[in-house]
Image (spheres, rainbow, N blue to C red):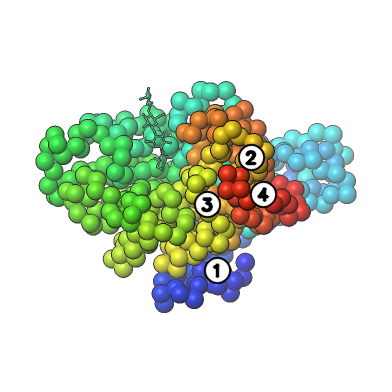
Amino acid sequence: MTAAVLAAALLPAAAPAGAAEPLRRGIEAERSALPGRVLARPGTSSGAVVRVRLDRGPVAWPIPLAAGPRLALRAGGCTGRIGVRVDGGPRRTARTRRAQRRIVLALPVRAGRRVVVLERRGDSCATVDVDRLDLDLDAVRITLGAALRPEQLDRPGVADAFRREYRFAMTENALKMRTTQPFPGLFLFDAADRLRGLARSVGGGLHGHTLLMHDQLPAWLDDRIQGWTRPLLLEALRQHVAALVGRYRGTARTWDVVTEAIRPDGSDWPSIWRRAIGPDVVEHAFRFAREADPGARLLYSDNAIENPGAHRDGVLRMLRRLVRAGAPIDGVALQGHLKPEIELTPAQLDDTMTRIEALGLRVQFSEVDVPLGLPVTAAWRLYGARAFGMVADACWQHASCDALGVWGVTDATSWWGPEREALPLDAAGRPKDAMRRLRLGVRGRLVAEDPVPPSAGAPLGSVVPAAGRF
Ligand code: G3I
């Protein structure tokens, strides 16, 4: 995407002057930081370690680059299979054919990572020339992630499905305050530590959910038990944020700093935080998080604001206040719980994302799921698949969107229950049509249409994804 197109994508007519300029510059800086080169000599034999050096490390822009660029190996006329592994991560293999000059493996590649060209079988050549590194950000610009609860890793197939499809892990409940600090000063991190290990196993990171929320609070915060003054509760918030963000610094590249601070009617949620600290509690939470990790991406997360309405307006008002106050907020995580009653069109989603980027904030998705109506029919399944395609296409259309998280690994782990078939992988972890559209959409190869719930009675047009293999 050229700078002009990028600018157009980020600077709609109504944008306040200069609000999105730093965002645009930052994204361009991210893109320009990538071109790298392989330091290996041509003719590197299999098994050698090929050091990959990027021209510059993760750019200064507040987000360390998420994994994503792809590695192109030019196979010198070999046939057979070539395997590649990055730093102990999952092995990627591709079949080469004599006529084929290049194979492309989508691998998370970051500065300093080792690329090990593994053995080949059945080929007729002596060496593989690893002499090119095409860091094609556009090809895999958007990283897919999934939320889970650590105990789900003991269920058959969940960990394998996660490692096959996703590159970052979100903590569904493991980093909520009731779980992490059940008593003042007592921190419990075993659950989140397990998810950190899983994220590392795919060379990805954690998306920490969440530092401040009106819900899932420990009993000791209840102000019917003890009166909280502003200074006291601010200090409790600072200590909580410092403990969590400090512990996962470097692995949790992204945080939901504040989740659902605004109610559906657009007013502030009257949580204990808001009552005892006041309207600037959100700003303080972001400042505490920035103090604890200057390199993390700090997001505001909310539910059901993809559509126009009082809820979205209330969130946009709060975001404007935060930006004007200079709060260290990097972006918004649209949760994307697309319940059938929330009829959302691509144009409405695009409008919401454009308004957020016009404030100079990034936008991404963090909790996408599409619970189908019951009984589930083929029409409902097509609706679900189209909804995921629409979200992926919307992320592709917005230059700042580089992460799309779904709220569960398989239908069996969905908080909606398996019967709602709300996720891109079925209960056994097999990709559904929704996964196909998700993969195509995040590579710019799907033109999504309105996902119309069958209950709305409108005919379901067929969506023929653009040509291309996923
Ligand atoms: O683990 C206990 C189990 O031991 C106990 O037997 C059972 C019955 O009490 O409860 C289990 O804990 C439940 C937990 O989910 C794990 O299943 C909690 O009661 C239940 O409240 C919790 O619900 C979570 C909900 O947030 C409230 O925290 C859901 O899993 C989680 O998916 C949901 O996620 C929210 C995001 O945080 C914010 N955005 C919306 C999203 C969906 O509501």
Task: Name which residue type carries label 3.
Answer: Glu
Q: Earlier in the sequence, mark 2 or mark 1?
A: 1
Q: Which mark is residue 381?
A: 2
- Classify mark 3: residues with Cα within 10 Å, few (<14), some (14-19) or many (20+): some
x 51%, y 36%: residue: 408
Q: Residues within 10 Å of mark 4 (few under 14, many from 20)?
A: some
Residue ID at (24%, 48%): 270
On the question of residue 61 being in view, the answer is no
| Front tag of 4 and 2 | 4
Which residue carries the number 3 mark? 343
Q: Is residue 428 left or right of residue 14?
A: right
The answer for how far apart the CA atoms under marks 4 and 1 are is 30 Å
Q: Amino acid at mark 4?
A: Leu
Task: Nearest to the eye among marks 4 and 1: give it.
Answer: 4
Instruction: Tell me the CA gap for discs 3 and 1.
Output: 24 Å
Q: Quadrant of ligand 1?
A: top left
Q: Position of residue 441 (x, y in %)?
A: 64, 52
Q: Which badge, 3 or 1, comes first in the chain's sequence?
A: 1
Crowding at mark 2 (Cα within 10 Å: few <14, some 14-19, many 20+): many
Q: Earlier in the sequence, mark 2 or mark 3?
A: 3
Of pointers 4 and 1, the one earlier in the residue sequence: 1
Which mark is on residue 385? none
* Horizontal side, residue 148 vs residue 242: left or right: right
Q: What's the CA distance linking mark 2 and mark 1?
A: 32 Å
Q: Could you tell me the amino acid type at mark 2?
A: Arg
The residue labelled by disc 4 is 460
- Is ligand 1 less than 8 Å from the beta carbon at label 2? no
- Up the image or down, 154 lies above or below 459; here it is above
In front of the other: label 2 or label 1? Answer: 2
Residue on which the image places disc 1: 9
